[in-house]
Image (tube, rainbow, N blue to C red):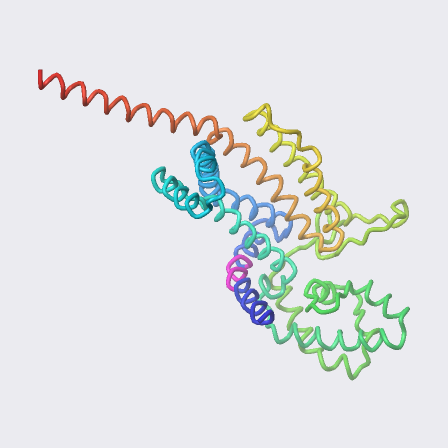
Amino acid sequence: MFRMDGVYMQSLFNIINMPLGWILKNIAGLMGGSFAAAVFVFTLLINIVLIPLNIKSQKSSVQQTRVKPKLDDLKKRYGDDRQKYSEAMQKVYAEEGVSPAGGCLPMILRLVLMLSIYYLILSPLTYMSGVEKANIQTVSTVISENMSELKSNDKEKYEQFKTTLNWREGTTNELSIVNIVRGEQNVLKDLLSDKEYAKIEKELEAIKAQDKESNVNYTFITNKINLTETPKFSIDIFNEAKPIWLMPILAFTAQILSSLLSMAMQKKINPDAPNMAGMMLTMPLISLFIGFSVPGGVAFYWACSSLVGGVIQVGVQNFYGPHKMLSRERAKELSKQCDFEAGQIKKLSKED
């Protein structure tokens, strides 16, 4: 059952990532081939497209706040009788036109999108360069088999090649293959025998041709940072620090700024809101920790998403904040009441 679920999830990501990869590739083409610039523009466009859903989610949250006093009264009235409370609650939701799940859709879409982009960045050959999966799988299988054999026979040499190739067991290692076909020196010649290399020579040439045609530049900041590289943290930061470390640090900083913006907006809306400084650090620290175990491109996307999403959320809060929306709802209710009373007065005047 788990395997089937995994297959379905992979199929879902394939359906989503094929058009996303095509869009990202074409944006990169417009940005001079820069993958980093394409990710930023792509993230900006996605967040703009999701603005209506953000507004819908905000409205749903406000509606929940509006009916909360009525729900609290129901809890007091029905006590531990959950069935009656549930029936009365559904009735209140229906009368008030409130959907309890109204704010879930944007969150689900963002989660699916985040996971899709994660896999997209891990698989640029499949989704951006259009390389045949059979070619990728063949190359990956041959290298993995030789790495496994080396692991059994020469642990030190295995660790050396694993670091050089940035090879991860159990995956197709598309980012590593990108670095292999783009490398000035063919590192596989040192790892594989002539017979083993011959098994994948044609596939490597096909991958190299497709990758060259896509013309996507995976470096960042004057070619100092390779976004296909996974940063490896070391306590010896003075000697072991690398430029790629900037990506998880950037993701951490972006999350902090986004959290600060969110806290400032919450305090503005509700000055009595509890201090969430502890919670504010949780997500940024998680981003920093995970950022040292995923390719730099993924951490860069998180940074872009946090910054762009945070700024847009501030804008949404300014125009669709709880106080403003509740005021509008109250104004509508008063307007309806006034219209009703005016109609009654007019009716009574005619009768007189």
Q: Name the spot of residue 300 as percent of width and height, x first.
A: 67, 48
17 magenta-colored:
yes
Residue in the image at 72% along x and 50% along y:
291
Horizontal arrangement in the rendering, residue 299 relative to residue 126 (left or right)? right
Horizontal arrangement in the rendering, residue 338 relative to residue 162 (left or right)? left
Q: Is residue 135 above or below residue 304?
A: below
Residue in the image at 89% along x and 71% along y:
155
Q: Quadrant of residue 71?
A: top left
Nearer to the camera, 121 or 181: 121
Nearer to the camera, 71 or 80: 80
Nearer to the camera, 64 or 289: 64
* Span highlighted in magenta in the image: 15-21
Q: Is residue 156 above or below residue 296?
A: below
Q: Name the spot of residue 67 as percent of width and height, x first.
A: 43, 34
Q: Quadrant of residue 197?
A: bottom right
Q: Main secondary structure of the magenta part?
A: helix
Q: Is residue 20 above or below residue 221?
A: below
Number of marks in the image? 0
339 magenta-colored:
no
- The quadrant of the rendering that contains the N terminus is bottom right
- The quadrant of the rendering that contains the C terminus is top left
Q: Name the spot of residue 181 as percent of width and height, x first.
A: 72, 67
Residue in the image at 75% along x and 49% along y:
289
Can residue 59 be seen? Answer: no
Nearer to the camera, 197 or 170: 170
Horizontal arrangement in the rendering, residue 249 relative to residue 69 (left or right)? right
Can residue 124 be seen? Answer: yes
